[in-house]
Image (cartoon, rainbow, N blue to C red):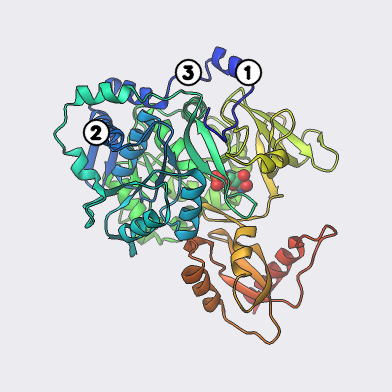
């Protein structure tokens, strides 16, 4: 077993295998099956290209073969910094075939995030773009990262790199190799399905993100149960409007669709017109996204909307943040489609409302777990006992695809897992008599901005490195579109003054953190309120910024 990985106890392993939740084959084997079952059907649509299951499989084989001939081994870690292009999908499947472990990072991560992830996981490979994409020089970044990271040897790029020590994915895909011999060679790298298939990342509450190891058995089980709960079939054609490596996207928007033989329309732009254009161009019937896009689509005028034929859109699936019921109703009415919502997390547990649910369930709850084997407890955190049905408490989860421990984090694991293996999610939920869950709050200290969770302590530590700052506390301020945005309450050093843009510049240029984590509001304060145990008391800060925003709105 991979060092630092915590698996399931024997009795649970036996139960999940016997009940068929775990098929006990590596994820890459499923890809072979799809390639023969769905052969000439489109697996991916991107711009004006359609890629069949057979082609996708062949691309994955070529890349996997290139990886192993360049020294990548089973269980090696592969860091990824890519936008939603088909090459990303081929690389993920190539890794799964040989048991190399993709680290599911976002394309917007920068130095701070990647240097930590690469070093913590001792990644040997980095997959990115050649040259500059969306204003960021990925290739130069990869070069610097490799120089600074002893473990990192192999760099693969979408597009042709200018450096001779990096490999172009397109070149690998067009190379003249014997596919049957490559398949035989790759078979020698077939991983154990009990081992991690990929590393997801926790939005987390501690100073550094935590790595979530997800095994072949558990991730496939998750995708299969989600696919079934969502009634996906070979006609399913979602436009996927989220970074693909995000757990929500990867499980529900890629794997759950592929295992049903559907077609994934790739995009990541949250620009509403471009999404409508993608739907029209591809006749997509589902949209998988986060609430930000719903608001943006509703902000379009009728005239703007009607420029696109989105009549193929039957259903919108979203999650990550709550959406007010009146907004949901308006969306359903405006776009004449059904809607379902999810509550879930990269650590495992996924709930969905179902297509057949009543309107009330769809509007007011985030549904129920996708697998019968998911166990959810609603806990009173003070007494450590379950609350009566209908009351709110912390969500604890355990099941065939919910992690049993963060990677290499024994201390943290003691805090966030019960003795019998329940993961303490840090979310406050309520559950109705039918088992439907409604998220009512959050105990964990993070900001939920659009699709992303931002770890408060991590950003606070960076701000406190700013020479003019004594200390800082981050809270989420309410925002109609993004759900929340980051507000920094800062105690400046005596006599120091600075602006929000100076602070942002410091965080980007000196601390090199991803842009989406930046504070969007700066509030100076004489002293930060603290709790009895000496932690920053965030509730009153949240109330304070909410009051300020309300007053500003009135003015
Ligand atoms: P991530 O692991 O990045 O997908 O984030 C998971 C976290 O997002 C959960 O633990 C919740 O705190 C939050 N979350 C997910 N879905 C919802 C939802 N529908 N409503 C409110 N919060 C949610």
- Residue carrying label 2: 62
Q: What element carries label 2?
A: helix
Is label 1 in contact with label 3 (beta carbons under 8 Å)? no
Quarter residue 420 falls in: top right
- Residue 140 percent location from the top left of the image: 32, 61
Coordinates of residue 255 in the picture (x, y in percent): 41, 33
Q: Secondary structure beneath disc 1?
A: helix
Residue 173 place in picture, x, y as percent: 20, 38
Residue 477, compared with residue 227, is above or below; it is below
Label 3: state its secondary structure.
loop
Above or below: residue 136 compared with residue 426: below
Whole-percent x and y of residue 490? Answer: 67, 73
Q: Does the residue labelled 3 lie within 8 Å of ligand 1?
A: no
Instruction: Please say whether residue 538 is visible from this viewpoint.
Output: yes
- Name the residue that disc number 3 marks: 23
In this view, the residue farthest toward the left is 176
């Amino acid at each position: 077993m991979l060092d630092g990985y915590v698996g399931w106890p024997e009795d649970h392993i036996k139960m999940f295998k016997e009940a068929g939740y775990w098929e006990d084959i590596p994820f890459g084997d499923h890809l072979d099956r799809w390639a023969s079952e769905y052969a000439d059907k489109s697996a991916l649509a991107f711009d004006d290209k359609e890629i069949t299951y057979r082609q996708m499989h062949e691309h994955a084989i070529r890349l996997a073969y290139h990886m192993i001939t360049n020294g990548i081994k089973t269980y090696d870690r592969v860091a990824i910094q890519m936008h939603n292009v088909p090459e990303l999908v081929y690389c993920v499947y190539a890794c799964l075939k040989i048991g190399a472990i993709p680290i599911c990072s976002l394309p917007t991560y920068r130095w701070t995030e990647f240097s930590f992830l690469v070093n913590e996981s001792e990644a040997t490979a980095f997959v990115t773009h050649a040259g500059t994409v969306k204003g960021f020089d990925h290739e130069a970044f990869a070069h610097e990262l490799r120089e600074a990271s002893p473990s990192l040897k192999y760099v693969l790029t979408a597009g042709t790199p200018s450096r001779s020590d990096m490999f172009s994915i397109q070149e690998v895909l067009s190379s003249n190799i014997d596919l049957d011999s490559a398949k035989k060679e790759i078979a020698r790298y077939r991983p154990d399905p009990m081992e991690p298939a990929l590393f997801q990342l926790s939005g987390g509450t501690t100073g550094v993100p935590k790595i979530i190891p997800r095994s072949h058995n558990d991730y496939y089980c998750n995708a299969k149960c989600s696919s079934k709960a969502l009634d996906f079939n070979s006609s399913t054609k979602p436009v996927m409007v989220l970074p693909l490596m995000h757990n929500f996207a990867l499980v529900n928007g890629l794997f759950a669709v592929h295992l049903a033989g559907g077609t994934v329309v790739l995009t990541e732009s949250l620009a509403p017109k471009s999404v409508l254009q993608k739907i029209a161009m591809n006749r997509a019937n589902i949209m998988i996204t986060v609430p930000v896009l719903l608001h943006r689509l509703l902000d379009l005028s009728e005239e703007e909307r009607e420029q696109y034929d989105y009549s193929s859109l039957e259903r919108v699936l979203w999650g990550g943040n709550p959406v007010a019921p009146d907004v949901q109703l308006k969306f359903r009415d405006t776009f004449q489609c059904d809607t379902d919502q999810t509550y879930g997390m990269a650590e495992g547990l996924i709930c969905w409302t179902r297509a057949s649910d009543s309107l009330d369930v769809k509007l007011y709850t985030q549904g129920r777990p996708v697998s019968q084997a998911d166990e959810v407890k609603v806990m009173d955190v003070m007494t450590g006992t379950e609350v009566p049905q209908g009351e709110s408490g912390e969500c604890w989860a355990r099941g065939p695809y919910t992690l049993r421990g963060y990677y290499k984090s024994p201390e943290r694991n003691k805090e966030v897992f019960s003795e019998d293996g329940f993961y303490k999610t840090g979310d406050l939920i309520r559950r109705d008599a039918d088992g439907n869950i409604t998220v009512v709050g959050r105990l964990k200290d993070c900001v939920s901005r659009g699709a992303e969770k931002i770890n408060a302590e991590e950003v606070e530590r960076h701000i406190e490195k700013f020479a003019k700052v004594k200390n800082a506390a981050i809270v989420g301020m309410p925002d109609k579109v993004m759900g929340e945005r980051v507000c920094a309450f800062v105690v400046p050093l005596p006599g120091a003054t600075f602006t929000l843009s100076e602070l942002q510049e410091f965080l980007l240029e000196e601390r090199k953190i991803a842009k989406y984590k930046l504070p969007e509001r700066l509030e100076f304060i004489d002293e930060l309120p603290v709790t009895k145990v000496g932690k920053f008391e965030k509730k009153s800060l949240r109330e304070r910024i909410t009051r300020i925003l309300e007053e500003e709105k009135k003015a």
